[in-house]
Image: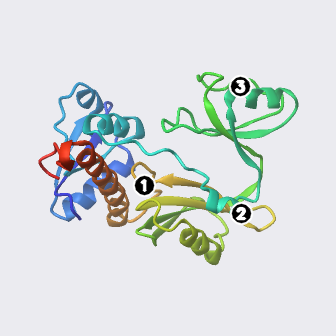
């Protein structure tokens, strides 16, 4: 792994997430320097950041660090176009207000935020249901028809290769050939990610969603594999930022001495 140092987010109340503990264990097992930080200190510019350090934090904190480092936050792509054949349900972009309007007209919808901040957890908006989250009606969302899942599994991918699988909702495992076909279809658009597949009520293996590798839940994945997922995607993001910085500088000479 290219990083020699890892910064892991510390919780204010002392209750640390299993994911941060997993990253810390894996980093220390590999002999990497590992330090903890508080988000409030990072926001105040009191946490030394550089592109040679791996960061493990929740998504809002990761985005704050990206802004400080000049790293462009990737556009969410939960339902890549090449995977839409595996959805086996209608999925479309909308706004929270439009979703509420459809629910008021008697339609049940599953709704989740479509922006990078993940402002609220996805939920089923029942017919006639009201606003259940503290978000603007203009908030961009993904809507989908409501389906019944027998099970749901998270598949972790690094460099186009599956490195682990963990149940999000235990039960019947998705068809391995379908999962492999989806991973092959995605190619290397992102160096590391998690792709969630489940089994529908009729036994069909279907795509739940794809999640970017820089900030995902591990669901108990092996410590080392989880570290590899985060590190691989973070390395890709900072390398892309370095390339953009070099191209933007006069004569193509980067202002960043590390490039």
The answer to whether 219 appears left or right of 237 in the picture is: right
Residue appearing at x 30%, y 47% in the figure: 244
How far from the left and from the top, in percent, is residue 195? 54, 60
**Residue tagged by mark 2?**
85
How far from the left and from the top, in percent, is residue 171? 65, 65
Displayed quadrant of residue 236: bottom left
Report the quarter where the N terminus lies: bottom left
Let me know if residue 152 appears in the view.
Answer: no
**Residue tagged by mark 3?**
97
How far from the left and from the top, in percent, is residue 172? 67, 69
The answer to whether 47 appears left or right of 23 in the picture is: left
The Cα–Cα distance between marks 3 and 1, rounded to whole angstroms, is 30 Å
How far from the left and from the top, in percent, is residue 91? 72, 48
Instruction: Say whether marks 2 and 3 touch (CB < 8 Å).
Output: no
Q: Residues within 10 Å of mark 1 (few under 14, many from 20)?
A: many
Residue appearing at x 71%, y 25% in the figure: 97
Helix, strand or loop status at disc 2: helix
**Which of the pair 136/165 is nearer the observer?**
136
Identify the mark nearer the N-term, 2 or 3. Answer: 2
**Which of the pair 101/245 is nearer the observer?**
245
**Residue tagged by mark 1?**
213
Nearer the observer: mark 1 or 2; the answer is 2
Q: Residue furthest right?
A: 106
Helix, strand or loop status at disc 1: loop
């Amino acid at each position: 792994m290219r990083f020699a140092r890892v910064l892991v987010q510390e919780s204010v109340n002392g209750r640390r997430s299993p994911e941060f503990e997993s990253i810390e264990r894996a980093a220390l097992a590999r002999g990497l320097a590992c330090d903890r930080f508080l988000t409030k200190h990072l926001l105040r510019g009191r946490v030394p950041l550089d592109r040679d350090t791996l960061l493990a934090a929740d998504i809002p904190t990761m985005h704050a660090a990206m802004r400080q480092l000049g790293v462009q936050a990737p556009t969410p792509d939960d339902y890549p176009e090449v995977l839409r054949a595996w959805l086996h349900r209608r999925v479309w972009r909308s706004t929270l207000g439009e979703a509420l309007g459809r629910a008021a007209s008697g339609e049940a919808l599953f709704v989740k935020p479509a922006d990078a901040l993940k402002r609220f957890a996805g939920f089923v908006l029942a017919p006639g249901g009201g606003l259940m989250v503290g978000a603007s009606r203009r908030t961009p969302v993904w809507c989908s028809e409501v389906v019944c899942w027998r099970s749901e599994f998270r598949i972790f991918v690094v460099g186009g290769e599956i490195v682990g699988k963990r149940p999000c909702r235990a039960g019947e495992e998705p068809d391995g050939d379908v999962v492999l076909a989806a991973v092959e279809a995605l190619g290397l658009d992102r160096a590391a990610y998690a792709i969630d597949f489940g089994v529908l009520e009729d036994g069909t293996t279907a795509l739940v969603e794809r999640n970017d590798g820089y900030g995902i839940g591990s669901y108990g994945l092996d410590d080392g594999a989880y570290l590899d997922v985060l590190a691989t995607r973070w390395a890709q993001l900072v390398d892309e930022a370095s390339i953009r910085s070099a191209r933007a500088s006069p004569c193509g000479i980067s202002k960043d001495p590390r490039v």
